[in-house]
Image (spheres, rainbow, N blue to C red):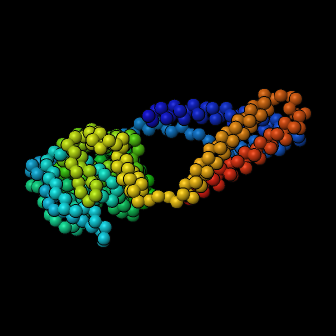
């Protein structure tokens, strides 16, 4: 997909350069003639507004990630009994019971606000809750929070961040690990506060490798990662021999990573034995965002009925927007045809004052129609 995008960008850039060169030639021709001076200015303004197409650079640098299992844990990783959690008056989890066994590859999915991240935090002991969570023998959890990058100290450099997190056994490997996460040469001396979102996430993942673990709990780990880095992380997780719990909305990322899905809905959790595609098939969904959308749609249909006046206005605005878009396309075609005639340097046109009158009238009409369309779309958004 990245290669196809680059090829498309190259083709678009080539066409755009031809158009720009052609417009520049027209400007030079029109500048010399007083009768076409306004046309030259119009073309100059048009040229200034063109956003130049750029081709993405090819980056062959790839992360090399491997999550080693520190020590073999017991058969049971975690026993979750009668767990409930609320934030003020908002109940998120209610009387949840789960058993997570060694070697499980689990996905937490479902609606936002239904407790996926909350249960992950409960398992790692980050927040208080009601109920009981018992971790198994020799369980060592590596936890990657959804906002993991925010826990990094912005006043430290990349290298100092890793050295601070390292111990005697792995401190000598810090630079190698950073190199695997694409922090090389002088980049290790960058302050964390100047890193991009993707760089911060890569650094947070690198830190994770410094701690002993046999269980990985990751909450939206692909946020801010580019496609290549995401694919490398996925491959590393596929090779991970420990227990994996993933909180994610990304169907493509979860494919091939999980064999057990827990759906969070209405303060409860439902188990699906199978991969993410099996879960979606059972729920008759095409993606992981649809469950939330369908519930909201259902509630709206049951509980809200827009006033008849708004429905009429909405219908009228839809018709108006559709008609305006059709008019705009027609006017743009006519303007394009006239500009093509100019481009062909038809000598008769230089003597035809009516041609330029029509052309300028069409340009004015286009501006008016565009203003009408913008106003109508604003009104539609307000509805």
Q: Position of residue 133 (x, y in %)?
A: 15, 61
Q: Nearer the viewer, residue 212 or 18?
A: 18
Within the image, what quadrant is residue 50 found in? top right
Query: Measuring 82% from the left and 39% from the top, which residue is drawn there?
Result: 358
Query: Measuring 40% from the left and 41% from the top, which residue is drawn there?
Result: 227
Relative to residue 147, is residue 102 drawn left or right? left
The residue most toward the bottom is 88
Q: Nearer the viewer, residue 163 or 328?
A: 328
Relative to residue 221, is residue 211 drawn left or right? left
Within the image, what quadrant is residue 302 found in? bottom left
Relative to residue 211, is residue 317 drawn left or right? right
Can residue 202 be seen here? The reply is: no
Query: Measuring 20% from the left and 43% from the top, which residue is drawn there?
Result: 273
Quarter holding the N terminus? Answer: top left
Q: Position of residue 172 (x, y in %)?
A: 25, 51
Q: Nearer the viewer, residue 167 or 85?
A: 85
Query: Measuring 58% from the left and 50% from the top, which residue is drawn there?
Result: 315
Q: Position of residue 383 (x, y in %)?
A: 55, 58
Q: Position of residue 105 (x, y in %)?
A: 21, 45
Q: Is residue 382 above or below residue 236?
A: below
């Amino acid at each position: 997909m990245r290669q196809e995008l680059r090829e498309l960008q190259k083709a678009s850039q080539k066409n755009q350069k031809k158009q720009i060169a052609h417009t520049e030639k027209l400007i030079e021709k029109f500048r010399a003639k007083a009768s076409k001076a306004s046309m030259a200015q119009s073309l100059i303004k048009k040229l200034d507004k063109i956003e130049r197409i750029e081709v993405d650079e090819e980056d062959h640098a790839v992360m090399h990630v491997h999550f080693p299992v520190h020590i073999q844990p017991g058969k049971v990783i975690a026993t979750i009994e009668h767990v409930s959690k609320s934030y003020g008056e908002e109940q998120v989890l209610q009387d949840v019971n789960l058993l997570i066994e060694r070697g499980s590859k689990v996905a937490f999915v479902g609606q936002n606000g239904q407790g996926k991240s909350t249960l992950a935090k409960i398992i790692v002991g980050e927040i208080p809750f009601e109920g009981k969570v018992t971790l198994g023998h020799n369980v060592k959890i590596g936890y990657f929070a959804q906002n993991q990058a925010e826990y990094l100290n912005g006043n430290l450099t990349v290298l100092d961040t890793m050295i601070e997190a390292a111990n005697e056994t792995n401190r000598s490997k810090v630079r190698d690990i950073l190199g695997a996460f694409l922090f090389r040469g002088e980049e290790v001396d960058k302050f964390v506060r100047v890193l991009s979102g993707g760089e911060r996430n890569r650094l947070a993942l690198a830190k994770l490798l410094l701690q002993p673990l046999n269980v990985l709990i990751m909450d939206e780990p692909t946020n801010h990662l580019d496609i290549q880095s995401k694919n490398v992380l996925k491959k590393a997780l596929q090779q991970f021999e420990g227990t994996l719990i993933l909180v994610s909305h990304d169907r493509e990322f979860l494919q091939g990573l999980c064999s057990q899905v827990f759906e969070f809905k209405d303060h409860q959790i439902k188990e699906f034995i199978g991969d993410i595609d099996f879960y979606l098939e059972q729920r008759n969904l095409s993606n992981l965002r649809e469950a939330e959308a369908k519930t909201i749609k259902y509630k709206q249909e049951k509980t809200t009925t827009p006033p008849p006046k708004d429905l009429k206005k909405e219908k009228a605005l839809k018709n108006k927007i559709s008609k305006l878009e059709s008019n705009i396309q027609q006017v743009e075609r006519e303007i394009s045809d006239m500009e093509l005639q100019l481009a062909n340097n038809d000598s008769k046109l230089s003597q035809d004052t009516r041609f330029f009158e029509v052309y300028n009238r069409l340009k004015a009409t286009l501006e008016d129609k565009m203003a009408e369309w913008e106003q109508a779309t604003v009104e539609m958004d307000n509805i």
